[in-house]
Image (tube, rainbow, N blue to C red):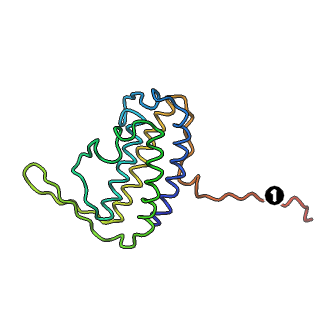
Amino acid sequence: MDYAGVYDVLTQARQRIFDWVRPLSHEQYTRQFPFGLGTLRATLVEIARVELFYRMRMRGEPLPALPLQETFPISETNQPTFAELAETWTEQSKETRSALAQTTDWNAPMHRRVEEGGKTVVYTLRKGEIATQMLLHEVHHRAQAMAMLRQLGVPAQDVDYAGFVVRREEHPNDTTSHG
């Protein structure tokens, strides 16, 4: 799989989401919904936060304990407004894209040791599995964000992968008579 290429499509779709969210008021951005993570802000922060977490994991960088706290670099505390999140996430995207493009050892196992209930648990995923989870996680929560946007009256649609990668050509039919 071309993880960086798929990520490029995700960032194109993300820009559409950004375009739909940008004109909303802060009250709309933080309005409570009875599904998903509850608000557009919480949903978008979750996607950006988990992207950073998985990028760190894929690179073998030290990780904070789970669940991620509000002290993590991406949080509702650190990016309370959409403009702040969009700026932070856009910058972060460059690093994520670079990490995906530079990784070659997709089958390398990455281990994470966690203390749980008086025992040590080791979680193992290959780098390719981490990248896949990061990409699919965004699609999952993006659908929740789009449902919230629709309830706010925004006609959020058409962010399917194929809509960004399928090339369409039109050719006139041959209308000359052969006979």
Q: Position of residue 18 (x, y in %)?
A: 52, 42
User: Which residue sits at x=35%, y=36%?
Assistant: 37
* Element marked by disc 1: loop
Q: Residue 107: x, y in percent?
A: 33, 71
Left or right side of 97 for 66: left
Which residue is outermost to the bottom? 104
Q: Residue at x 33, y 48 (%)?
A: 73
In the image, 112 versus 173, the foreground residue is 112
Above or below, 171 against 106 in this view is above
| Disc 1: CA contacts within 10 A as few (<14), some (14-19) or many (>=20) | few
* Position in image of residue 62 (x %, y %): 25, 59
Quarter of the image containing the C terminus? bottom right
Vertical placement of residue 94 versus 26, above or below? below
Amino acid under disc 1:
Pro
Side of 92 where 65 appears, left or right: left
Which residue position holds label 1?
172
Please tell me which residue is depicted at 36% across the width and 59% down the height of the picture: 55
Q: Residue 36 falls in which quadrant of the image? A: top left
Instruction: Say which quadrant the N terminus sits in.
Output: bottom left
Q: Is residue 15 left or right of residue 38?
A: right
Image location of residue 137, percent across then percent down: 38, 50
